[in-house]
Amino acid sequence: MRRAIEQSYARAPFFHEVMPSLEELFDTDEDRLADFNMNGIGNLARLIGLQGRQVVRASELNVDGFGTDLLIGIVRALGGDTYLCGGGAGGYQDDARFAQAGLRLEYQNFRQAPYPQLGGGAFVPGLSTVDALMNCGGSGTSRLLGAGLAVARGT
């Protein structure tokens, strides 16, 4: 993974800003994928400027249930009043149950803002956060996320 990222992004404008955080992740000795992922999320969040935010594992919450009931339990356990779901969620969750539970349901309609990518050419959407970080840096990626959310909300 390290070598593939180096080969793909060595000439990217923010390679030297981003690669140390990725190196730190690659050098961990995590035995569990979940722990590796949590470290990766933390590293990327720091680069984007979200280090003050808390990431909580559902397994750390005292919630029971399956499907929609589990999602409702998680939102309540975290003191939330809104569940943000992906566009394809309608096929597996019961939207009416959120309203019955007194929770707002908001469908995510995120549209990625284009950014300059290594090599020029047409913008390729849907790549990883690593691509945005390598091409735009931490603060640039943070601005991109804000722009994508603004487009999704129509603001």
Image: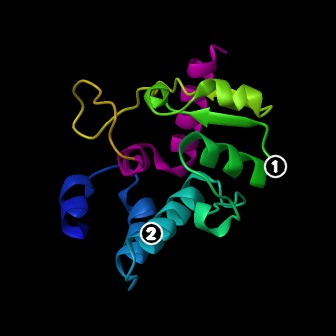
Magenta: main secondary structure:
helix
Measured along the vertical axis of the image, is residue 80 above or below residue 9? above
**Amino acid type for the residue under numbered disc 2:** Ala
* Residue highlighted by disc 2: 34
Give the extent of the magenta segment: 129-155
Other residues around mark 2 within 10 Å, as few (<14) / some (14–19) / many (≥20): few
Q: Nearer the viewer, residue 41 or 44?
A: 41
* Residue highlighted by disc 1: 79
Q: Is residue 151 magenta?
A: yes
Q: Nearer the viewer, residue 141 or 102?
A: 102
- Residue plotted at (19% across, 68% down): 3
- Tag 1, which secondary structure? loop
Tell which residue pokes out farthest to the front in this image.
65
Residue 53, how many percent across, how many down? 70, 57
Tell which residue pokes out farthest to the bottom in this image.
29
Task: Tell me the quarter of the image containing the N terminus.
Answer: bottom left
Residue 125, how many percent across, how many down? 33, 30
- Residue plotted at (45% across, 61% down): 17
Asked whether, in this view, residue 75 is left or right of residue 34, the answer is right
